[in-house]
Amino acid sequence: MFVETQEERPEIRERLHRVGITNLRSVAKINWKGKVYTFLPLFEITIDVPEEKKGIHMSRLVESITEAMSEAVEEEVMEAHSSLEELGRAIIGRLEGKHPHKRAEVWIRTHLIIPRETPASGKTTYEPYDVEVGVIKHYDGTFEKVLRVKVIGNTACPHAMANNNGKTHIQRAIGELEVRTAFDEEIALEDMIDVVESSFSHPTYTLLKTVDENAVVQGMHANPKFVEDVAREIFARAKERFKGRIHVKVISNESIHKHDVIAETWS
């Protein structure tokens, strides 16, 4: 007979809102528009702990992920999870039968690889994007989701260009967009990525032939932007396309300074 120390009363009786596991690597299969995609994401899953319990049963959280993964593998020919957020909700659903809780969160971080065409030669290039999906079950039983994307682009400085006969410094910029919305609100991560990527001076590419490199450089210089311009454009486009609370952050890795520049805003 094992002693369930998690069920004992703690010395300090305080409710904890988030307790669980983080940085758990596993497999995820998503059936997106009839095609099955395989991801190797990092999971974070947490629940609340009432003041009268010392801790949680960690293995039950891992079991919830494993069982949801097995469900996806077994049903992939039919109806596997249709999105990462659906997978997150399925994990919470599994957890409800394993561990008492009133609040739960599942966060899934992974890479999304999207095929693109290079700007001049038209060659296929596969571009990686960092994405994160969170599913939150609140104390009142309602569900909310959080979608995050991180996109790499570039900027050409308009101030230097205006003062140096068209010559300027350029830098890599990183744009982050978060949308926090009702669970049933349909928002595609690809659409969020497009909003961010189209707001830079120019997109960046993994593959560039010489003609493509020329097109990128010319495109950047034809569209100079401050980091503030990029943040405002992402925010404006996101407000037009997505329903929910929006958070935008852009960091410019400055090429002529030893520091970086940041612009951030939210609704």
Image: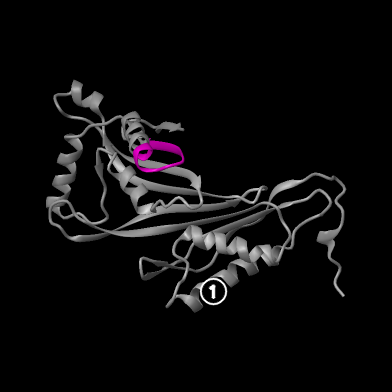
Q: Is residue 133 above or below residue 229?
A: below
Residue in front for this viewpoint, 205 or 39: 39
Question: What colour scheme was applied to this rendering of the protein?
Answer: one colour
**Picture coordinates of residue 180, whole percent (x, y):** 49, 44
The kind of residue on which mark 1 rests is Glu
Name the residue rendered at 65%, 63% in the picture.
95
Measured as percent of width and height from the top left, residue 252 is found at 36, 36
**Residue 128, located in which quarter of the rendered image?**
bottom left
Magenta segment includes 245: yes
Q: Is residue 132 left or right of residue 257?
A: right
- Quadrant of the drawing holding the N terminus: bottom right
**Residue 136: percent from the left, percent from the top?**
58, 51
**Left of 65 or right of it: where is 236?**
left
Q: Which residues are magenta?
A: 238-252
Q: Position of residue 253 (x, y in %)?
A: 36, 37
Of 181 and 193, the residue lying toward us? 181
Q: Left or right: where does residue 56 sit relative to residue 240?
A: right
Q: Is 198 rendered above or below residue 86?
A: above
Residue at horizontal 85%, vertical 45%?
Answer: 12
Q: In this view of the protein, which residue sits in the foreground, 102 or 150?
A: 102
Q: Which residue is mark 1?
A: 71
Element assignment for label 1? helix
Q: Is residue 167 above or below residue 51?
A: above
